[in-house]
Image (tube, rainbow, N blue to C red):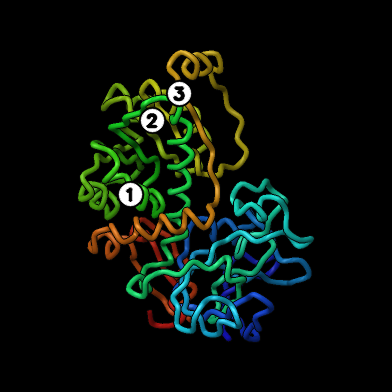
Amino acid sequence: MKAIVVGRGESRPRVIEKSRPEPGADEALVRTLRVGIDGTDHEVLSGNHGGFPEGTDHQVLGHEAVGVVEDPNGTDLATGDVVVPTVRRPPADGSNRYFDAGEPDMAPDGMYRERGIAGAHGFMAEYFTSPAEFLVPVPREFASHAFLVEPISNSEKAFELAYGSRSTFEWTPESAMVLGNGPLGLLTLAMLDERFDRTYCLGRRDRPDRTIDIIERLGATYVDSRETPVPAVADTHEPVDFVYEATGHAKHAFECVDALAPNGVAALLGIPEDWTFDVDGGRLHREFVLENKALVGSVNSSVPHFEAAKESLAAFPDWFLDELVTGVYSPDEVDAAFETGDDVIKTVVEFDSP
């Protein structure tokens, strides 16, 4: 079968031939339909994130996938079921309390593997196997876009943590801002449309631009960070109740505190590189204490978040998905699929027709 991989010491994806995997006990064989490409895939390619499976000279890429069950292999799944795989798997030395509790997304670094990212092959191949417990069935009509369930699930978890941090009092948020107009930022902005009266999305793009068009079509206000940096948002627009950070720009973790309204909360999802800079720690400390503000960090997601993501995906307008996905490529077009640029939002590798 064809698989898209990166080799040790390489920084570009390539197609190789691999043997079709055989499902083990409690595993199903899945025929891959589509696999989405995101910033994490590019981080893996550059060697800045994740790690290779032990004892291999390459890693199969891809963690945002949708496929069809080819062989249920005695599991509760049925041949032809459309499924989305979760990403985290137990470490090589066996399960632990996080997986036993159904909360693999809360496992600390070193206590998990991640398909296509850290220590385990991904889904960017014609077939993959997975334990049935990590396969989430989705309606057949979702087959074209269900690879988006995984990134949407990450936002579902971030919302859960943010709202949980405000659960000790009556919190009635009205405004929200997404930092970042990449695919995750745009997906999240579309999810916020039904949750908040006023929404904003921050980026660094000049008009005309496809992402700005999407932002404004969703009814949100585009904020150009070159004109209105994050600390100035409160004065230029309004203090916001919720901030969703999807840039990985380290300063935003501190700057977003200034953008928050009293009792507000920010969820941090971007993963920055090391960066040392000065902040007024005393002032930020006062903001947290005197204004009841909060920051929460969030990474990965679990099966309940995938289930919630299905509902969010179903609620998106058709035009949004059509605008978000800017390229669908065959495995042989791997170089084009991984190209980046201002005209690229979300690209997909299609192994079989949905």
Image quadrant in which the C terminus is located: bottom left
Callout in the foreground (2, 1):
1
Q: Is residue 16 above or below residue 39?
A: below
Label 2 to label 1, Cα distance in Å?
Answer: 21 Å
Which residue shows up at 45% across the image and 54% down it? 153
Provide the secondary structure element on which disc 3 rests.
Answer: loop
Residues at marks 2 and 1 touching, judged by CB atoms closer than 8 Å: no
Query: Which amino acid, by three-letter code, is at mark 3?
Result: Lys
Label 3 to label 1, Cα distance in Å?
Answer: 23 Å
**Residue on which disc 2 sits:** 230
Q: Could you tell whether 162 is left or right of 345 in the image?
A: right
**Residue on which disc 3 sits:** 293
Image quadrant in which the N terminus is located: bottom right
Q: Quadrant of residue 137?
A: bottom left
Which residue shows up at 47% across the image and 33% down it? 252
Query: Which amino acid, by three-letter code, is at mark 2?
Result: Val
Q: Earlier in the sequence, mark 2 or mark 1?
A: 1
Query: Which amino acid, by three-letter code, is at mark 1?
Result: Met
Q: Could you say which is closer to the camera, residue 17 or residue 195?
A: 195
Q: Quadrant of residue 28?
A: bottom right
Q: Is residue 263 above or below residue 95?
A: above
**Residue on which disc 1 sits:** 191
Q: Position of residue 314 (x, y in %)?
A: 31, 61
Q: Could you tell whether 166 is left or right of 18 in the image?
A: left
Q: Position of residue 303 (x, y in %)?
A: 52, 58
Q: Position of residue 322 (x, y in %)?
A: 27, 65
Mark 3 is surrounded, within 10 Å at the Cα level, by few (under 14), some (14 to 19) or many (20 or more) other residues, namely many
